[in-house]
Image: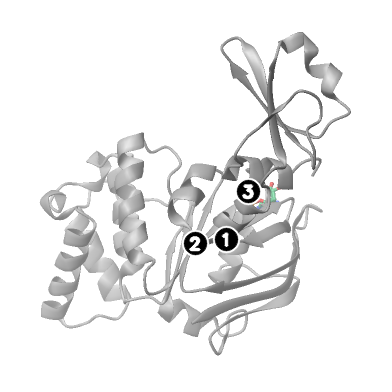
Amino acid sequence: MQLSISNLSKTYSNGVTALKNVSLHILVGMFGLLGANGAGKSTLMRTIAGLQEADSGTISFNDIDVLKEKNKIRQILGYLPQEYGLYPKVNAETLLDHFARLKGISDAKQRKEIVDALLQRTNLFDHRKKNLGGYSGGMRQRFGIAQALLGSPQLIIVDEPTAGLDPAERNRFYNLLSEIGENIVVILSSHIIEDIQSLCSNMAIISKGEVLLADSPDKAIDSLKSKIWRKVISKEKLTDYKHLKVISSHLFGGKVEIHVFSDSNPDHFESVEPTLDDVYFATTFNK
Ligand code: ADP
C-alpha cells in the first residue's frame, strides 16, 4: 500500500501559491505533515481527498490515479476535515447510521453491527443517545474518527485533529489514532510538534507550500546529533548572537534559553541532545 505524490503544485486565484512541487511517498502507518498555519497542509489534504484540483502533478494510491479517479478514491478514503459541521440535535448513533447508509451499507442489521462496533472503538457507545450538540471537543473528534472509519478505508486523512483538545482528551485521541495506523495509511496534519512526535513513524515538514524535509522523526533527530548548542542569556544580550544560527529562543526563569545550530561549539555553549523541536526549527530557519 503506497500513496505517491509527485510534483504537486497549486496557486489559488488570489495569487497565493499553496503547494510548490510537492513530492512524497507515504507507506502504511502514521505519516505526519508538520507545518505552521498557512503552510499548505489543508490544501494538500483536500487535494488528496479529491475535494479540490491541483494545477499540476500527480497522486496515486496503489493503482488508483487519485486526481482522475475521484470516485474510486472516495470508496477507500476516510477523511476528517479540520472543521466540519455537526447536526447538534441528532445523536451519535443516528448520525453514524445515516452516514453508513450514505456509504452504501444498506443492510440494516449489518449497519447496526458496524455502527455499534465503531461507537465502542471510539469510546462513544455510552454516549450514543446523546445529541452531538452536547459533545465535548474530544468526543466530537472521536465521532469524526468513527465516521471516517466507516466502510473500512485503506487511507485516512485527519487534518489538525488535536487543535482545541485539552491534554487528557488529546491523549485519548492519540491512543485511538495509533491503533488505526497499524494496517492502513494514515496522514495526520498538525502544527503541534508533540502530535507528530507521539504518533508518527514518518513525517514531512512543510513551509510555504514546500516540503523541506521528509524522514522518520528518529532519523531526523539523529542527524542533528552534536549540532545543537544551548545557552541561557539575558534578554538584552540576544542581539549579540545574531551572527549565529539561533534556531529557537524560549523564556527560561525570566532569562532566555537559546538553541544554536552549529557544527562546533560557538562560544561557551553547552551541547544538548536534539529534539524534534530542534529539527523543526533548524529546518524552517530563515524559511
Ligand atoms: P494550512 O492547512 O497549513 O494552514 P492551507 O492549505 O489552509 O494551510 O493554506 C495555504 C495557503 O493558501 C495560505 O496562505 C492560505 O491563506 C491560502 N489559501 C487556502 N485556501 C485558499 C483559498 N480557497 N483561496 C485562496 N487562498 C487560500
Q: On residue 35, which mark appears?
A: 3
Amino acid of disc 1: Ser
C-beta proximity under 8 Å, tags 2 and 1: yes
Q: Left or right: 100 with respect to 241?
A: left
Callout 3 touching callout 1 (CB < 8 Å):
no
SS at circle 3: loop
Residue visible at 22% across and 52% down in the picture? 90
Going from N to C along the chain, the mark reached first, 3 or 1, is 3
Q: Report the residue at 77% width, 57% height from top.
A: 13
Report the side of 150 relative to 16 (left or right): left
Element under disc 2: loop
Gap between marks 3 and 2, in whole Å? 17 Å
Give me the C-alpha separation between circle 2 and circle 1. 6 Å
Q: Residues within 10 Å of mark 1 (few under 14, many from 20)?
A: some
Label for residue 216? 1
User: Which residue is label 2 attached to?
Assistant: 201
Pinpoint residue 81: horizontal percent, then vertical percent. Answer: 47, 56
Residue positioned 59% across, 39% down in the render: 273
Q: Point out residue 82 in the picture as x, y percentages from the top left corner.
A: 48, 51
| Nearer to us in this view, 277 or 232 | 232
Instruction: Single out the mark in the foreground, 3 or 2.
Output: 2
User: 191 or 53, which lies in front?
Assistant: 191
Which quadrant of the figure contains the C terminus? Answer: top right
